[in-house]
Image (cartoon, helix red, strand yellow):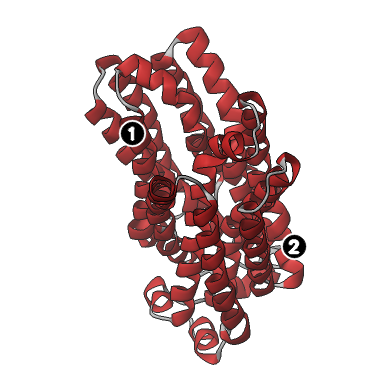
Amino acid sequence: MRNRWLIALAAIGIHISIGSVYAWSVLTKPIMAEMGITLKETTWTFSLAILFLGLSAGFLGSFVEKLGPKKSGLLATLFFGTGMLGTALAVEEGSLAMLYLFYGIIGGIGLGIGYITPVSTLVKYFPNHRGFATGLAIMGFGFAALVAGPVMQYLTGEFGLRNNFLILGAVYIVIMSMSALYLKPPVANSAVEAGEKTHQGATANEAVKTWQFSALWWIFFVNITCGIGLLSVASPMAQEVVGMDAAAAASMVGIIGLLNGAGRIIWSTVSDYIGRGMTYIMFFLIEIAAFYHLANTVDAMIFQLLILLIISCYGGGFSCMPAYLSDLFGTRELSAIHGRILTAWGLAGIAGPSIIAVFRENTSGYDYTLYFFAGCFVINFLIALVLKTYGRRKRVHALVETH
């Protein structure tokens, strides 16, 4: 029998390693200078990584479920580690194609497998606190940039860009391997007897045929699209709209990373007490008001508070989703179902910055973008209301109970 707190630590170990992808912006200028490529070409590396995170989570979810957490964790280590070490080679060769292949595609596949691997296992160890359990793991992904950003900056400055990827690749391989080797589902008739029902549930194929799944996919997609869009322009928007200087804007971006991680554990824990449906309703009410007021404020303090509030809901949307899925569909194939939902993240990673760019070019400002996002959350609020009221209908319960 594994210690459930060490299982949680193993889950965090995997997520804090792969979550370093959120610190990509720290490497943008060094990569442009070293490889002689444009900002757009460099940014596409990150977009590819997020796209393949979503695609691999979606298409390999059932495969990960069959492999089990230990083997799938090691597989994630293989892909992500290869991606990091291969990126070092891409930098040395000055090859953009290799950068896309190793960091974007191979590394992205490692991100997707690693993201879904520990969640289903962790939920089974905390059957009565599913939100807290998923928040613990996914919090690591949100906080990773706080650790990885300064470390990448130091390593690149002291040892060069190529060696930054080699050193971090080796460190992540060790952390992820040790974490994966400890992961193991709880045994039957153990101290987790209270969670025996959580081993039951719908298959991924059954779940995706329900309207509840489609509704959750959509609200997840909108929440990430608007959140990533805001993240992509937070610093320049702060400087242009409320007159913050570059240093203050950079400091705000650091606090955003903190709230992104903290929001994941705080909101997911809250959801254990008020329910997942009510938590998402609160997210969208907050985001409607926050995006609307963000378009109308010129006060730097209010501007920052509104952005931090939005980002906490953005992070919370990630951590509450696996628990919501387990509430509706059980955990029999939670990794696979969660993986299908994560395809929304892959598409949102492209949609968010693209929407921001289109509005920015055509309106010469951010106001209309923020109003558009507020409107999107009105629709999300209505869908979340329907989900809370009718989501746990008899058909979903029947799928869970018959397995």
Q: Quadrant of residue 361?
A: top left
Q: Residue at x 54, y 55 (%)?
A: 370
Secondary structure of residue under mark 1: helix
Judging by the rendered image, the residue that carries numbered circle 1 is 40
Q: Is residue 287 left or right of residue 359?
A: right
Query: Between tags 2 and 1, which lies in front?
Result: 1
| Residue 366, x across and y down, in percent | 52, 48
- Whether residue 55 appears in this view of the structure is yes
Judging by the rendered image, the residue that carries numbered circle 2 is 270
Rendered view: 106 above or below 398: above
| Local crowd size for mark 1, using a 10 Å CA cut-off: few (<14), some (14–19), many (≥20) | few
- Please state which amino acid type lies under the numbered disc 2: Val
The one of 150 and 365 positioned closer to us in this rendering:
365
- Whether residue 185 appears in this view of the structure is no
The one of 114 and 152 positioned closer to us in this rendering:
152
Q: Is residue 301 left or right of residue 9?
A: right
Q: Quadrant of residue 380?
A: bottom right
Q: Residue at x 34, y 35 (%)?
A: 45
Q: Residue at x 47, y 36 (%)?
A: 21
Which badge, 2 or 1, is on the more N-terminal residue?
Answer: 1
Secondary structure of residue under mark 2: helix
| Residue 44, x across and y down, in percent | 33, 37
Across the whole image, how many numbered discs are drawn on residues?
Answer: 2
| Residue 266, x across and y down, in percent | 73, 54
| Residue 337, x across and y down, in percent | 44, 66
CA–CA distance in space, label 2 to label 1: 39 Å
